[in-house]
Image: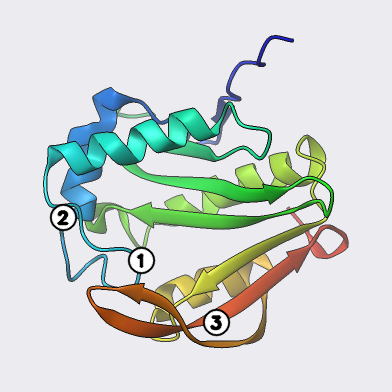
Amino acid sequence: MQQPAFPELETPRLRLIELDHQHAPALLAIHQDAHHMRHWGANPFANMSAAHEFISACRAGWKLQTPVMRWALQHWADGEILGTCGLFNWDQRWQKCFLGYELNPSAQRQGLMREALKKILTWGFARGQLHRVEALVHPDNQASLGLAAQLGFQVEGRLREVALWNETRHDMLQLGLLQPEWQP
């Protein structure tokens, strides 16, 4: 059976397209900023090779039985790649997955990520046949917690020292959104 085409989605200001190796410079610009990415859950990208490895993993993951769906956020106005968002760690039997995202600091506080996440969550609940979407958010990441709350996610608990990056253990908040709660 042939793999279906990666779903391209559109919002009023963004095209959500499959992450590609041509997006590596934009991704590196976001991920090498250690301060900006301090809550993301992984070490900053050290070089262009790290950006390409991330992209390769996402592209390979799309073809798996438990897909990784990572969209690049492309601005309609100028074609610039502003960040990525995606659904990963799918469990089709339980109809759930995780949500992840990051945005260039220059594009923050404009509602762009909320616009993109509304689109992929709507797609995930309808086409992806999801019942539940989860997110792990660092307790100090107030911007991400605020965005998740606007989308309807509820904090379900604190996972103590569940994450490890930059040689430090981190607590993460477990958030969840159920399909019957979703209001696009």
Q: Which mark is residue 40?
A: 1
Taking depth in this image into account, of 32 and 126 the one nearest to the observer is 32
Residue at coordinates 51% horizontally, 76% vertically from top-left?
A: 146
Residue at coordinates 45% horizontally, 29% vertically from top-left?
A: 59
In the displayed structure, 86 sits above or below 172; it is: above
On screen, residue 7 versus residue 140, left or right, reads: right
Residue 171: percent from the left, percent from the top?
Answer: 45, 86
User: In which quadrant of the rendered image does the N terminus lie?
Assistant: top right
Indicate the amino acid at tag 1. Answer: Trp
Does residue 80 appear in the picture of this structure? no
Badge 3 element:
strand
Q: Count up the numbered dots.
A: 3
Taking depth in this image into account, of 161 and 31 the one nearest to the observer is 161
How many residues crowd around disc 1 within 10 Å: few (fewer than 14), some, or many (20 or more)?
some
Residue at coordinates 23% horizontally, 67% vertically from top-left?
A: 36
Of labels 3 and 1, earlier in sequence is 1
Of labels 2 and 3, earlier in sequence is 2
Residue at which label 2 appears = 32
How many residues crowd around disc 3 within 10 Å: few (fewer than 14), some, or many (20 or more)?
many
Taking depth in this image into account, of 15 and 70 the one nearest to the observer is 70
Res. 133 image quadrant: bottom right
Badge 2 element:
loop
Hey, which residue is sitting farthest top in the picture?
2
Residue 47: percent from the left, percent from the top?
Answer: 11, 45
Of labels 1 and 2, earlier in sequence is 2
On screen, residue 85 versus residue 167, left or right, reads: right
Q: CA distance from mark 1 to mark 2?
A: 12 Å
Indicate the amino acid at tag 3. Answer: Leu
The answer to whether the residue labelled 2 contacts the one labelled 3, judged by CB atoms less than 8 Å apart, is: no
Indicate the amino acid at tag 2. Answer: Gln
On screen, residue 44 versus residue 12, left or right, reads: left
Residue at which label 3 appears = 173
